[in-house]
């Protein structure tokens, strides 16, 4: 019996859908609650190739909602992309999985798209700055992508092929960033529902060649679901799909980025990685894990560092100053 027998028998998908899926490449931005779940579902379904980008490590607070990971990943301070690749290879060895331990920027996203030529880009991030970068660059390359976001009991999904509104049409400016998962919390079913709906849009596109063109919002606690025709959101003044100004690309590099869960990402000079650094507890050719007092940080080869358990940019910059004697 075929490994994919049950989904092939689903008339909405069928044998041709399975063939299409096996030839498809998916670039997944983020390997957290959304990205890791999406990666697992696509691997189990028989995707041809999965490319996962993230610079985070697996932490204990991830495990209640990020079901691909386990305590061993936490104890080994595993990079999420490496853990994803290892787990997926055990789930389905037929799927090609590529781990990219990088933060996504406008420059490297262009490079990744040119290199891998993905069928669809899938959002598993936790910030709108990166989502606007995805929106602008995918429009430039005419590549469909699937947006997903969740917080508390609420989730939002919207798949974009630019036949109707893009993300910037609906959200011209980033929503209030005062809310984040470390403060507001996140229910595991909310993350899994969001990821499942994102994969539903992917499977529809693979089988039928188009998305639903509906903007979907839900509350996993009240069980309220809303699906709105995105045609009505199309903006003739959109700086992405109307005027092609692409402001997310033009804004230049970010040096200090607030992330979810009490984390900050800071871009340091690339040569910092090769200097003698105190308090290293784990080191690989691509990253160094640092623990000092209550703070954990990990430094990537390109000079990007994530600092955990800090709750202001000033506190994050102070950590950098103490560790490297660098002002940012």
Image: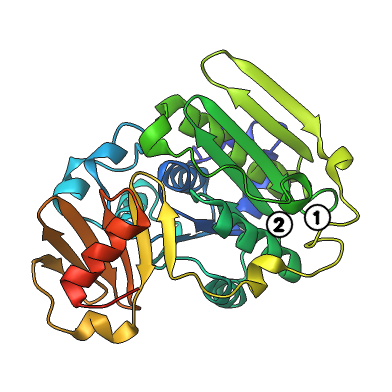
Labels 1 and 2 touching (C-beta < 8 A) = yes
Residue 258, given in percent of the width and then of the height, sits at 42, 55
Horizontal relation, residue 308 to residue 194: left or right: left
Is residue 246 among the parts visible in the rendering?
A: yes
Q: Which mark is residue 136?
A: none
Q: Is residue 149 above or below residue 223?
A: below
Q: Is residue 283 above or below residue 130?
A: below
**Res. 251 image quadrant:** bottom right
Q: Which of pointers 1 and 2 lies earlier in the amino acid sequence?
A: 2
Q: How many marks?
A: 2
**Res. 94 image quadrant:** bottom left
Residue 262, given in percent of the width and then of the height, sits at 33, 46
Q: What residue did someone put label 2 on? A: 144
Residue 76, given in percent of the width and then of the height, sits at 15, 54
> Quadrant of the image for the C terminus?
bottom left
Is residue 82 among the parts visible in the rendering?
A: no
Residue drawn at (38%, 55%) of the image: 93
Residue drawn at (72%, 70%) of the image: 141
**Res. 302 image quadrant:** bottom left
Q: Is residue 221 above or below residue 308?
A: above
Could you tell me which secondary element the residue under label 1 belongs to? loop
Q: Which mark is residue 162?
A: 1
In the foreground, 45 or 83 = 83
Q: Is residue 300 above or below residue 2?
A: below
Q: CA distance from mark 1 to mark 2?
A: 7 Å
Could you tell me which secondary element the residue under label 2 belongs to? loop
Mark 2 is surrounded, within 10 Å at the Cα level, by few (under 14), some (14 to 19) or many (20 or more) other residues, namely: many
Residue drawn at (50%, 57%) of the image: 29
Residue drawn at (9%, 54%) of the image: 293
Mark 1 is surrounded, within 10 Å at the Cα level, by few (under 14), some (14 to 19) or many (20 or more) other residues, namely: some
């Amino acid at each position: 019996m075929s490994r994919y027998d049950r989904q092939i028998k689903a008339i909405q998908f069928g044998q041709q859908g399975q063939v299409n899926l096996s030839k498809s490449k998916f670039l997944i931005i983020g390997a957290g609650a959304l990205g890791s779940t999406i990666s697992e579902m696509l691997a189990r379904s028989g995707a041809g190739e999965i490319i996962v980008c993230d610079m985070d490590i697996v932490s204990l607070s991830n495990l209640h909602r990020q079901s691909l990971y386990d305590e061993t990943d936490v104890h080994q301070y595993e990079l999420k992309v490496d853990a994803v690749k290892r787990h997926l290879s055990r789930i389905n060895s037929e799927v090609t999985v590529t781990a990219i331990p990088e933060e996504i920027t406008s420059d490297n996203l262009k490079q990744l798209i040119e290199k891998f030529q993905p069928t669809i880009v899938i959002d598993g991030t936790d910030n709108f700055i990166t989502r606007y970068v995805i929106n602008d660059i995918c429009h430039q390359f005419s590549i469909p992508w699937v947006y997903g976001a969740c917080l508390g009991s609420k989730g939002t999904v919207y798949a974009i092929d630019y036949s109707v509104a893009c993300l910037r049409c609906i959200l011209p400016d980033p929503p209030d960033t005062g809310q984040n998962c470390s403060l507001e919390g996140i229910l595991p079913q909310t993350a899994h529902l969001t990821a499942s709906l994102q994969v539903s849009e992917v499977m529809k596109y693979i089988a039928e060649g188009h998305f639903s063109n509906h903007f979907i919002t839900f509350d996993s606690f009240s069980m309220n679901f809303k699906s709105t025709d995105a045609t009505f959101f199309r903006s003739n003044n959109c700086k992405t799909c109307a005027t092609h100004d692409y402001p997310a690309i033009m804004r230049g590099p970010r040096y200090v980025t607030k992330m979810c869960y009490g984390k900050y990402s800071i871009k340091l000079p690339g040569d910092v990685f090769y200097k003698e650094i105190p308090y290293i507890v784990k080191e690989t050719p691509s990253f160094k894990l640092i623990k000092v007092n209550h703070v954990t940080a990990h430094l990537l080869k390109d000079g990007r560092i994530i600092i955990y358990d800090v709750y202001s940019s000033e506190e994050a910059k102070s950590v950098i100053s103490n560790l490297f004697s660098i002002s940012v």
